[in-house]
Image (cartoon, rainbow, N blue to C red):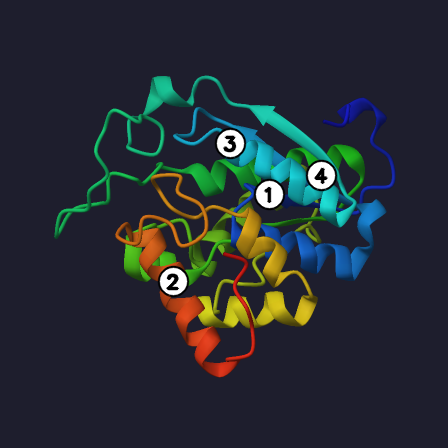
Amino acid sequence: MTDVKKLQGIRTVVIHSGGMDSSLCLALAVRDFGADSVLSLGFDYGQRHGDELERAQRIAEWFGVRRYVVRIGCYGELTQNALMDASIPIEHREGEDPNTLVVGRNGLMVRLGAILADQLGADSVYTGVIGVEAANSGYRDCTREYMDLMEQIVRLDLGRSDFEVRTPLVDMTKKETMDLGYELGCLEFLLDVTVTCYEGVAHAGCGTCPACRLRNEGIREFLTARPGFALPW
C-alpha cells in the first residue's frame, strides 16, 4: 500500500472496493487520466468479506495504479448490518430496508475520498454507484440525486466549486457495464477477480443473493449478445 505522504501527481481518486463497478470506474479513470495520475482508494470498515481489500490491491496492480487504504474502525460501533457482521443472516423482507444496507456508506466514502483528493491536488472522485442497486436492492445512496447532494456538500467543505463527484455507471444496466468492461479490454480479468456475492463466493457466486442475481442476469444478457465470449470459469 502506498504511503499517502509520498503521493504526487494524483489527478483523481477512485473509491475502489474491488468489486466490478468500482473497478470499471478505475479502468475509466486510467483511460482518461493515465495510470500514474490515478489513486485507488479503499476503506477497511469491518466488511463481511475482508478479502475484497486483497482483490482490490490485485486489481490496482493490474491497472498499474497506486493504492491507499483508510481504516474506519468505528463504523461497527455506530450501525449493525449483515455486511459488517457475518453472524447476521442476509435477508431482505418485503417493505423493509435490506439488512445489507450500510447506512451512509457511499456518502461517507465519497466525502473522505474528496478530502484526500483535495489534499493531493486532485479535483474529482469516482464512485461506482449504479441506479439499479437503488431500484432493486433498496440502496438509497446509489443514485445520482444522492451524489448531486453530496457533490454540493463536498464543494462547500473544500471551498471548490469545480470539484466533481463522478458516477459514470449510475444510469447503466448491469449488461451495459459488461459491455463497457469488454470495450475497455478488462472484462475477462474483472469477472475472474472481482467478487460481488454477499456470501463471498467467487465467479458465479451463490446465485441467490440480490447482488448475484443482478450480476448474473447482466452476464446472461451480455453472453446472449456476444456468444463467442468465454467466461473465465
Q: Earlier in the sequence, mark 1 or mark 3?
A: 1
Q: Residue at x 38, y 46 (%)?
A: 197
Image depth: mark 2 or mark 4 in front:
2
Q: Is residue 22 left or right of residue 199?
A: right
Decide: few, some or many residues near mark 3? Use Cα within 10 Å; few <14, some 14-19, many ≥20: few
- Label 4, on which residue? 117
Q: Residue furthest left?
A: 94
| Label 1 environment density (alpha carbons within 10 Å; few <14, some 14–19, many ≥20) | many
Q: Position of residue 151 (x, y in %)?
A: 56, 50
- The residue indicated by pointer 2 is 216
Real-space Cα distance between discs 2 and 1? Answer: 23 Å
Q: Residue at horizontal 85%, vertical 26%?
A: 6
Which of the two marks, 3 or 4, is nearer to us in this view?
3
Q: Of the two numbered discs 3 and 4 on the same chain, state the one appearing first in sequence.
A: 3
Identify residue type, mark 3: Asp
Residue corresponding to mark 3: 51
Cα separation, mark 1 vs mark 3, equals 17 Å
Task: Name the residue that disc number 1 marks.
Answer: 15
Q: Is residue 61 above or below residue 85?
A: below
Q: 178 above or below 123? A: below
Q: Give the SS element for disc 1.
A: strand
Along the viewing direction, whichever of 157 and 18 lies nearer the viewer: 18
Contact, CB < 8 Å: mark 3 with mark 4? no
Tell which of 69 and 200 is nearer to you.
Answer: 200
Residue 59: in sight, yes or no?
yes
Picture layout, residue 115 above or below residue 204:
above
Q: What amino acid is labelled 4 in the image?
A: Ala
State if disc 4 and disc 2 touch (CB < 8 Å).
Answer: no
Q: Amino acid at mark 2?
A: Asn
